[in-house]
Amino acid sequence: MALPYQALADVVLVLHFGVVLFVVGGLLLVLVGNALGWRWVNAFGFRLAHLVAIGIVVALSWLGEVCPLTVLESWLRVQAGASGYSKSFVEHWVQALLYYEAPFEVFVLAYTLFGVAVLLCWWRFPPRRA
């Protein structure tokens, strides 16, 4: 029985998109939530998971590595007979959605600045243990 590579690739795509939403949306939630007095946005577990997620993104970009989820999805797509990614996940989708092509260094800078913004939020709105 052949594995459903395309379906598995789509599952990885959705998971990867969820991680991107968590990283971007998490920072927005911390900023908006603190402005609105939502205490839960400073929960230690939420904030730590968010910091670890962006930390991994920044570390991989500085090392010049592609996200393992991108590698897995691309491999699954190739196994299904489709073409894999030739760039990182975010580069691929930014180009596909916005028709904008930028060098990898632009994404490294963006990830780094976003990581700095997350760290600044830890300082400005420190997480709280229950």
Image: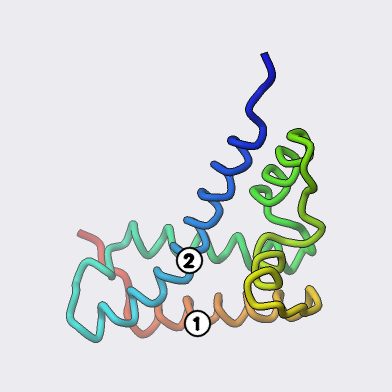
Residue at figure coordinates x 48%, y 77% from the top left: 119
Residue at figure coordinates x 68%, y 48% from the top left: 68
Q: Which mark is residue 33?
A: none
Query: For mark 1, does the 10 Å Cα neighbourhood hold few (<14), some (14 to 19), or many (20 or more) residues?
Result: few
**Is label 1 in a helix, a strand or a loop?**
helix
Q: Is residue 18 left or right of residue 70?
A: left
The quarter holding residue 62 reads: bottom right
Residue 43, horizontal then vertical, whole percent: 27, 63
- Tell me how far mark 2 sits from mark 1, CA to CA: 11 Å
112 to 90, vertically: above or below: below
Q: Earlier in the sequence, mark 2 or mark 1?
A: 2
68 to 126, vertically: above or below: above
Q: Which residue is at the front of the view, 97 or 52?
A: 97
The quarter holding residue 125 reads: bottom left
Q: Nearer the viewer, mark 2 or mark 1?
A: 2
121 to 22, vertically: above or below: below
- The residue under label 1 is which amino acid type? Ala
The quarter holding residue 6 reads: top right
- The residue under label 2 is which amino acid type? Val
Query: What's the colour scheme?
Result: rainbow
Q: Which residue is at the front of the view, 32 or 15?
A: 15
For the C terminus, the image quarter is bottom left
Residue 83, horizontal then vertical, whole percent: 80, 47
From the image, tell me which residue sits under label 1. Answer: 117
Q: Which mark is residue 23?
A: 2
Residue at figure coordinates x 46%, y 64% from the top left: 21
For the N terminus, the image quarter is top right
Residue 81, horizontal then vertical, whole percent: 79, 37
